[in-house]
Image (cartoon, grey):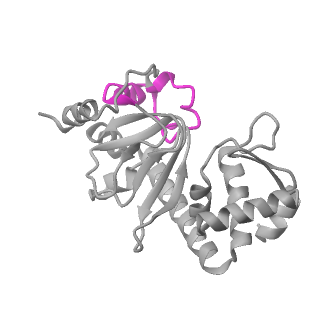
Amino acid sequence: MPCFILFFKALIMRNLYQRVCVPSCDKCESKSQSFFCSLSNEDLQKLSLNKINIFFKKGQEIFHEGGRPNGLFCIYSGKVKIQKIGEDGKDQIVRLAKKSDIIGYRALLSNEPYGASATAIEDTVVCHLSKSAYFDILMNNPELSMKTIQQLSADLKTAERLIMSMAQKPVRERMAATLLALKEFYGTEKDCKTINAILTREDIGNLAGTTTESAIRTLSDFNKEKMIKLTGKKITIIDMTQLIKIARIVD
């Protein structure tokens, strides 16, 4: 039995699969901004014939560190965190992903187990594209091959910046930089100030490379200093200039 069908059956057994209304790839509203924007409608239709749409509730795992990939995940809606288990046994967020981003592609390309886990941080719908269909198009489309190289380079650059930030900056600077990065990555709500993502204090601390307690304390300090406003788990940026100054962002 093909691996693609086995994967589909496994999802049903785990109660992760729900029927969701997702258009074909050639009619997707995000296709012009997606990883597959260079593909022809014919190739997009080919992908659609070899994909399943999966709904994950907030907190559900999309793939697990050490598992074997048999396809590529493209986020149709929602938000995802990619995390690794550190030497101390705690999770460390290494990347965030949002609508139209792809995840799980590096393990697929290298034919290795997943080096990290992916978890939905809000209700999320992903399209799982079969390995054979993706590889077939990749081998015959120079633009998609170049796009893949660019994606790998961008992810490496992000990882390098994260390592440098955690190694050299104090907690207050890292927290300011994290808030600015979240605003840049996820955008804002209609007020143009409130970060359009709700993360736990643990996740924010994880991104900043600090403890949950330090994250809570630093966010409270920023709130008292009127740089941000905390409303439940929502964070509104009040004084962008001061946050940039604290984060020591120079480029």
Query: Is-magenta flag for residue 243?
Result: no
Residue appearing at x 31%, y 31% in the figure: 15
Residue appearing at x 74%, y 60% in the figure: 219
Residue appearing at x 45%, y 19% in the figure: 21
Q: Name the image quarter holding residue 11.
A: top left
Q: Is residue 26 left or right of residue 1?
A: right
- The answer to whether residue 176 shows anywhere in this view is no
Residue 227, image x and y in percent?
85, 57
Query: Where's the C terminus, which quadrant?
Result: bottom right
Query: Is-magenta flag for residue 39?
Result: yes
Q: Look at the image and give the residue range highlighted in magenta.
A: 25-54
- The answer to whether residue 181 shows anywhere in this view is yes
Residue situated in front as seen by the camera: 90 or 67: 90
Q: Looking at the image, which residue sits at the far bottom? A: 168
Residue 60, image x and y in percent?
42, 42
Work out whether 83 lies above or below 5.
Answer: below
Q: Is residue 73 left or right of residue 204?
A: left
Work out whether 74 lies above or below 203.
Answer: above
Residue situated in front as seen by the camera: 97 or 72: 97
Residue 214, image x and y in percent?
66, 68
Residue 218, image x and y in percent?
73, 65
Query: Where's the N terminus, which quadrant?
Result: top left
Residue appearing at x 27%, y 53% in the figure: 67
